[in-house]
Image (cartoon, rainbow, N blue to C red):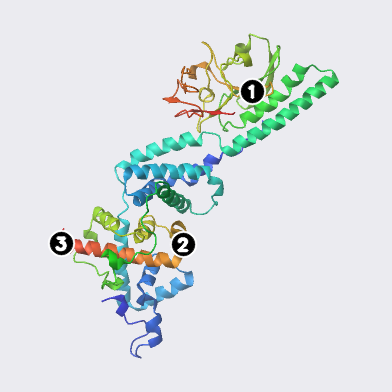
Amino acid sequence: MSLHTTPPLGSGPTGPDPMRRTTAWHADPLEVDRWLDGEGSPAEREARARDLARDPALAARVEARKAFLGLLATGRSPSPQDAVAEARLREALAREASSPAPARMRLLRRWQGWAAAAAVLLVALGAWSGWGLSRAIAVETPAEMAVRLLDWIPSGSEGVAGCAEAGPSPQTFVLVQDGELEIRACEEGTEGQDLSRALLRRPEELPAVGFVAVPAPGARRSSEIGITEMGKDGVVVFDVLDHGKRVYLAVDAASLRQRHPGKGDAWTCAACHGTARQAMDNPHRIVLRRLR
Amino acid sequence: MASQPPRPTEAFERECLPWLADVRAFALALTRRPADADDLAQETFLKALRAFSTFQPGSNAKAWLFTVARRLHIDRHRRAQVRPQPLAEQPLEESGLDPAGGAGPGEASTPPGGWSRFTPEQVRAAIEAVPEPFRMAVVLRDLHGLAYDEVAEVLDVAPGTVMSRLHRGRECVRRHLVSLLDTGR
């Protein structure tokens, strides 16, 4: 028997009500489904629940429909390929998520503009006040730069060494380590002693510029933070900003990789797998983005 | 040192990644090919990540991801200049799956042995056989548990249309399953 022909509620000893025959909700299969799908306002559902409670035959038919709808839900069962596909997808997302968002890049560029203006101002003030040019830049602007850059580092990162350096010797570095900011003046050639985790190089010694190293999500160790390449012993750490001021994030040399000649901006991460290039994604830990 | 602003990916991971399997399953329903489904699912999440600022906190992330997936799927068809399956109402009579041929919900009539005699594979195959656009309504509601208004949002149709498509799609599934009994399969 179809619900189409179900006598509407209200039919009984007193006879059917023709108005209710045309308006009874259970005469409309779409409305029955809507009830079973949990749709409708609380008041409406309450009224329909009362209808079902009063009419066992109707309730049984609705229950049969419910059993069928329950069967449909069994069609959603995981396939053996799901786990593999999910793993691949998660990996791709991790790569994407660890790259700086466009908005951040825009902010950085905007900030760079302000930093340039601030640097000019500092230089002018420094010169006007009798301070040396290098002193003004070295102590103030690089620190700001380093702090800004380090804002990219996820909270909870440990042993992060961020450094800024500018001007001729004596060089001044801004070191951020374990969340503490300090400024150290280093004599040339002693950088490695000052920074336990990083061997710094002066800008002109850097083999590559124009990248910023960004830690991947979940990066915990300093060796997972930065990247670069450098001569035989070293680090590098990028970002090298314009306007003669340079800021670095530094990491220990153990996690570094080699540049691949003839492959453009491709680098290999020793601590990771694979080779990335250009705006390159380190598959697991490190991401490089070209800033300009 | 300035306090760290929350990383947008953290919220994204919290809201969206739990639906990864669902999105892939939905992508499979859209594309019907596992390799294409994987691509679509990946593209969906990458696009969602980039557009996460437009996500309304507190709303249904799964429905939002499904919407992204469906639009990407349509865009792919357009780019490939492949005509997607028609989204307009297709007369079921033409498909040979018209449920109006006698099966009202009352005849959801439990088959001999009950509905539990059908396996998930049979149910899946029956849903696969439902013509578009009714199949999508069934997939979204019955397989993924979306509410009517969420299905409407994903499919970009009115809620009333969802009700109609859903019911007709379900009837197609029911008839398909019952036909298995008739043919002894």
Query: Toward the viewer: A143 or B81?
Result: B81
Q: Which percent across, then down, holds residue A195?
A: 61, 16
Who's the residue at 71% across and 16% down the image? A167
Circles 3 and 1: CB distance less than 8 Å? no
Q: Earlier in the sequence, mark 2 or mark 3?
A: 2
Going by the numbered disc 3, the residue's amino acid type is: Thr
Residue annotated with mark 1 = A247
Estimate the spatial distance between the alpha carbons at disc 2 and disc 1, rounded to whole Å: 52 Å
Mark 3 residue element: helix
The numbered mark at residue B119 is: none
Circles 2 and 1: CB distance less than 8 Å? no
Task: Please state the chain letter of the residue tagged with numbered disc 2 in the rendered image.
Answer: B
Mark 2 residue element: helix
Res. A202 in view: no
Residue annotated with mark 2 = B149
Res. B88 in view: yes
Estimate the spatial distance between the alpha carbons at disc 2 and disc 3, rounded to whole Å: 38 Å
**In the picture provided, is A134 more to the left or to the right than A254?**
right
Q: Specify the farthest residue to the bottom.
A: A14
Residue annotated with mark 3 = B183
Going by the numbered disc 1, the residue's amino acid type is: Val
Q: Which percent across, then down, holds residue A117?
A: 74, 29
